[in-house]
Image (spheres, coloured by chain):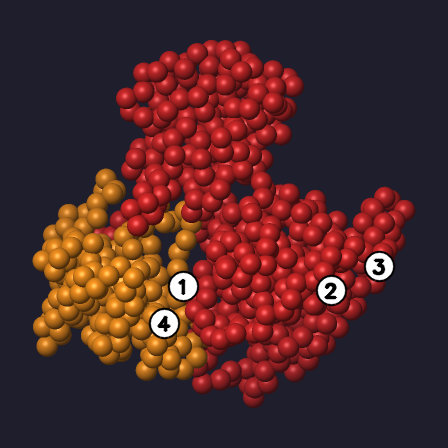
Amino acid sequence: MKTDIILSGVGGQGILSIAAAIGEAALKEGLYMKQAEVHGMSQRGGDVQSNLRLSDQPIASDLIPLGHADLIISLEPMESLRYLPYLNKEGWLVTNSQPFVNIPNYPEIEKVNAELDKLPHKVVLDVEAIAKEAGSVRAANIVMLGAATPFLGLEYEKIEEGVRSIFARKGEEIVAMNLKALKAGYEIAQSKQA
Amino acid sequence: MGKHLFLGDEAIAQAAIDAGLSGVYAYPGTPSTEITEYIQGSPVAKERNIHCKWSANEKTAMEAALGMSYAGKRSLCCMKHVGLNVAADCFMNAAMSGINGGMIIVTADDPSMHSSQNEQDNRMFGNFAMIPMLEPSSQQEAYDMVYEGFELSERLGYPILLRVTTRMAHSRAGVETREMKDTLPMHCPEDGRQRYILLPALARQRYRKLIAAQETFEQASEASPYNIYYDAPDKSLGIIATGIAFNYLSENYPDGFKHPVLKIAQYPVPTEKLARLVDECDEILVLEEGYPVVEQQLKGLLSKGLKVHGRLDGTLQRDGELTPDAVGKALGLTITQYYATPEVVEQRPPALCQGCGHRDMYQALNDVLAEYEGAKVFGDIGCYTLGALPPFRAIDSCIDMGASITMAKGASDAGVFPAVSVIGDSTFTHSGMTGLLDCVNENTNITIVISDNETTAMTGGQDSAGTGRLESICAGIGVDPAHIRVMIPLKKNYEEMKQIIREEIEYKGVSVLIPRRECIQTLTRKKKASKK
């Protein structure tokens, strides 16, 4: 088992919380893991990415080679496209559909969508809208995690456990809401995969 | 003991605690900050009363670490690469005095300049000071090197420079920790005066000792478990891989190395192992993250008789961090890319946060300076450096910590008017105060803006050394209190701010303007914490 994942978004969107949830689940599985993050200046509203590698064998490089990523998880549609050179031929791209516009020259969203349409394997979803339906817009990242789950190489139940342990101290109500968000994302991804 | 998921920085911190650390001294700087933060958050560190407060700058940090080592205890000193420039005076001379309690200096270099002004490779500094160096190739090695490094430092009698780069510092992996050792009791050196008083007569002796110690350092490298020779059948090429470059090399040979490989992770370079590689192989490829340090040593000026490839002959790109792809290309392997980044993707540079006080400061400053033709604004290092980018385009320079004040001074001396300096509160106490004294002593015609957000914001909101005392510090240095003007940078105060800026530019002497409003990030975090 080996899954190479690139997480992307805009500084402050919270890609690292998604990485942490996956990492938690992978660790419980006894898998090897490496995760390279970006800190510092680049976090201030700029593009951010994290390389997350899971494997049942020891992992050498902290960075994923070009053309090797099995999965791109992005909280922002234009940012999902930035890392396409890393995606392998059969790789999946799972992205939020809603643009984060903090630059004056942000492209027309139709043009971004046209590029996404060209990809053979993708899940594009409005994570905030789905999260709102599940109970709170704050669970948007968990919807994204759910949508990415079918491609992680980890069992859904393990991810569920990870989410449970992250939110445990916030009470059963918050846990239940996040599990609902996770499931909503998961089901959408599964329907696209079929 | 057990297995933990650690950033490279955290592995270093935990290893230091486990090795019986008594104090960490540091000034925040990407990618080194998390080492000290980890120790600050560690319950064991608290229980053991391990010193972990931030220092005013890297030089004060290193001197304090040397003092703790003098008193017989194990000390750690952490900084980003350019921080070692600030601490260089102490660094070079700590190699002369040597140490008492084990001392490890961590330099976190930032090739590709993710968050820095240059990509200097501090292995050059290690060679310059002639002390042993460690450069881990994995988070586990980072842990082991620090855990054992204090003893190595004590055994050799010198500080050890541990070098990591961004990808090691900021990447997580599983790390096996070891048994926690006791801290050392205080014991000052008996021959202290012979070693620590670097008067010329004594310093000459110490330098000869340091020169003589080089052989011991090399023997330690030769015997080091981190320097490993991997034999392989195809001897048309021999590969040297230092530090993290070893990971990228391994990534490209998942089924084992095709050519002999010398992994170097402890310096000085183990010359016997190196000689074996050179003797057995036709050509040599050197893979290093950073400058071609080993490559240059191996090649010499004329590189007669030896075919060496690497950064110097263009086999690898001369600048920037290594990647598995760059290494693969240097090995002649095919890199397959299936998709390209579509043209529609635009750059998304970092920017000042919405609601940040620096924004309001720059807006008011820009409006006033538009009234003057020859205005120059000398910037400094911190979030406010982002004032260089649109929409503000407000600064003309950003060189090093504190340079805003002194460069504005020199420009003013040359006739520039208005000569304005923009510096943050933490950068001011780091390296701005001495420059201010120069200005005061000459009554330089200068306007200094200390944009005070009451924290060290860029690195994530660490304590700032002068919080609550900036006016008294400036007055103490000798600025006329009538020209120390505090304001609250908010849109509703623009007219008042502009009036003050205008008045102080027109004042022929040293003015200090202090726009003060808490960092929006630390404020948000505090609000969140109080809700819980």
Q: Nearer the viewer, mark 2 or mark 1?
A: 2
**Letter of the chain shown orange in the rendering:** A
SS for tag 1?
strand
Instruction: Tell me which corner region of the image, top left, top right, bottom left or bottom right, holds residue B312.
Output: bottom right
Which residue is the site of mark 4? A53
Residue in front for this viewpoint, B465 or B504:
B465
The colour with which the image depicts chain B is red
Disc 1: which chain?
Answer: A
Which mark sits nearer the N-terminus, 2 or 3?
A: 2
Location of residue A13 in the rendering, given as x and y in whole percent from the top left corner: 27, 52
Q: Which mark is residue B154?
A: 2
Which mark sits nearer the N-terminus, 1 or 4?
A: 1
Location of residue A172 in the rendering, given as x and y in whole percent from the top left corner: 21, 64
Disc 3: which chain?
Answer: B
Are the residues under marks 2 and 1 on the same chain?
no
SS for tag 4?
strand
SS for tag 3?
helix
Are the residues under marks 2 and 4 on the same chain?
no
